[in-house]
Every structure is written in C-alpha cells, then in structure tokens.
Amino acid sequence: MRKLFAAALLAAATLTSFAAQAADKVRIGYWTSGVSLGYGAVLESKDFLAKRGIDAEFVHFPDVNAPLRALASGSIDLAFGAPLAGVFGTAATGVPVRIFAATQPADVQFVVPEDSPIRSIAEFKGKKIGMSPAGSSVAVIAGAVLAGNYQIKPNEFSLVGGNESRLAQFLAQKQVDGAALRSVTVAQLGGELKLRRLGSFADEWKKLTRSDALPYIGVGAVRAELVDRQPEVVARVIAALRDTLAWGNTHRDEAVQILQKKANLPADDARAYVALWNAMNRVGFEPEDIATLRREHAVFVESGLVKGELKDELFITAPYEQSKTLK
C-alpha cells in the first residue's frame, strides 16, 4: 500500500508539473512581412509550441520596429525575429531586453530594374534607394555597406522605406532608382519585374569586415523579466522554434499550403519562400553567432548608425544551451 501510495503521489506530481508547464503563457510578436511572415505562419499553424508546454498568444505588427516597442512596453514577452539594429539601440537606452538566438540571416540583394543605367552599387550616390524602414537591420546594414565599401554617406542617398511588396511597387513605378530586397522577394517577382542584381549583403559584408561571417538582420529577443524568472520557458520556446525550422525543411509541400492559406501568398510566391527556407531562417546561438553579432554592433557604431555601449548581459545563452537537452 505504501508503494502504491508513493507511486500515486509521484504520478500526481508529474501531472501537476506537466499542467503547470502547459499553462505557461507567452505573448509572441512578429512583423507580418518579409522573412517573419512565412516562418510565423508555420509557427502559428503547427502545434510545436503547445507540444513544448507553451500556451502561445501571437500578436501581429504591420511595422518592422513595432515588436521592439511592444517588448519595451510589456505588451509582448518575446519576438522571434526582432530587428537586430533596433535591439542594439533599444538595449542601449536601458530597456531590459535580451537576445536569446540569432534567427534571420541577411539574405538580401541590392537590385535595380533591368533597364536601369545603374551598373554598380557605387552609382547609388544621390539616388533614391528602397529598403526596409529606417531603423531596421536591413537599412542599417545597407547604410554601413554603402559608407564603408563605397564612401556613400547616409545623407548622400535617399532612403525610401517600405515593406517588400511596397518596395516592388516602387521599383515597377520608377519611384526609386534601386532597392535592397530579400532574395525571396527577388525570386517571387520572377517575370513580373525583371531586375538586375548588383551585389548581395553577404558578399558586401565580407568585403567590409574582411571575414567570412554572414550578418544577421533578425534575432530572438525577450523581456529580461521573463528570462530571469523562467529561463526554462524560454528554452522550451527555442526548442519549438527549432522544431518549426526542421519541419519546414522536411515538409515543404505542406509549408507551401500553410503560406497560401495563413499568409495569403500566391502559390508561386509560397514555393519561392519555402525554397529559401534554410537560407532565411536559423535558430543558433553558438559562440561564432555571438561573435558575428558583436562585430555587427561594432560596424554599426563605427558607421554612426547605432549608438550606445554593447553590454555582455544583452546576450543570454543559458536558455539556448538548455534547449539542446530537450528531446
């Protein structure tokens, strides 16, 4: 009887622990454009978070920088694709946010219309260039590259901000001379708008930093209060993000269907996104990833595009390490 009673207590404790784990509510915000749209659609549609004991409430934002403002105000707990440059700036002002993973490589191309007389990025001086809004990581990396590789200062070109579909319209209507577009957008445009690629962020960043590191435009960011109080919850979110990444890679036809239904993408656009799934999405926080983020901060500060000190506490690695142990 004593053994049965002990076993019953153990079972009850296990069930109670699981129930408590399943009740962990996390408000997750993301920008409903660019890279975040497709990955977010799959994350929302599948039950990877629920399987990890996370009761997720998703909050959508039409502005790339809005998730950061929501983190600062406490409106959300976590963002899986926060703009890196914005996170650096927000943290420097004293807002208690932490980076828990590097999630979105800068898979971006400098392009012009095929019939444009512009043949080189060096000719962007004095021109109107479309890209993600000022303050976004794309805008900051583009500014650093233009200044560092081509001596084009921020005040020597006009930044025309917008989401990817809007930027495509600007190019088609000749409202901008060139643009910095994600590779997936260039692929999605296909025959609708013929573009000439002048260079990629990857190649230009290697030239600027004299390294082989690929820069990131988006990171996982979390309120310090949550990660300090419940690091295991963040670890389970990271595990779910990794599950989503792996599933999208091995279930591409299903991912295409989700993007068509959830993200309202045409079939061809959805297939173009999924074809670049691994190039656009990551869940990493190894020492080399952190070293790359630190290098980006240094370049941003040197270019005058980001201000403030980079503190070690910004990078919180314990949840990522713990997530590796979760099966």
Image: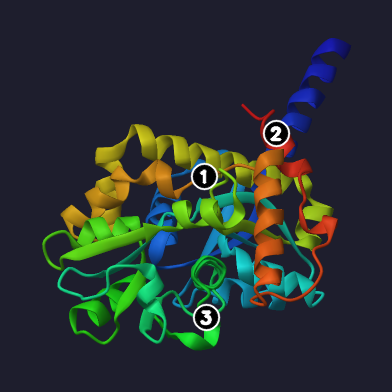
Q: Nearer the viewer, mark 3 or mark 2?
A: 3
Label annotation for residue 15: 2
> Mark 2 or mark 1: which comes first in sequence?
2
Amino acid carrying label 1: it is Arg
The C terminus appears in which quarter of the rendering?
top right
Q: Is residue 100 visible?
A: yes
| In this view, 48 is above or below 37 | above
Label annotation for residue 87: none
Amino acid carrying label 3: it is Ala
Q: Is residue 77 visible?
A: no
Residue drawn at x 51%, y 44% is: 282
Task: Check disc 1 and report the residue beneath it.
Answer: 282
Q: x%, y% of residue 229?
A: 83, 54
| In this view, 32 is above or below 45 | below
Image position of 61 (left or right of 309): left
Task: Check disc 3 and report the residue beneath it.
Answer: 134
- Depth check: 100 or 228 in front? 100
Amino acid carrying label 2: it is Leu
> Mark 3 or mark 2: which comes first in sequence?
2
Q: Nearer the viewer, mark 2 or mark 1?
A: 1
Element under label 3? loop
> Mark 3 or mark 1: which comes first in sequence?
3
Judging from the image, the colouring scheme is rainbow
- The Cα atoms of the two marked residues, 2 and 1, are separated by 33 Å
Q: x%, y% of residue 292?
A: 65, 50
Q: Residue furthest left?
A: 191
Q: x%, y% of residue 172?
A: 19, 78
Image position of 13 (left or right of 28): right
Residue drawn at x 67%, y 40% is: 288
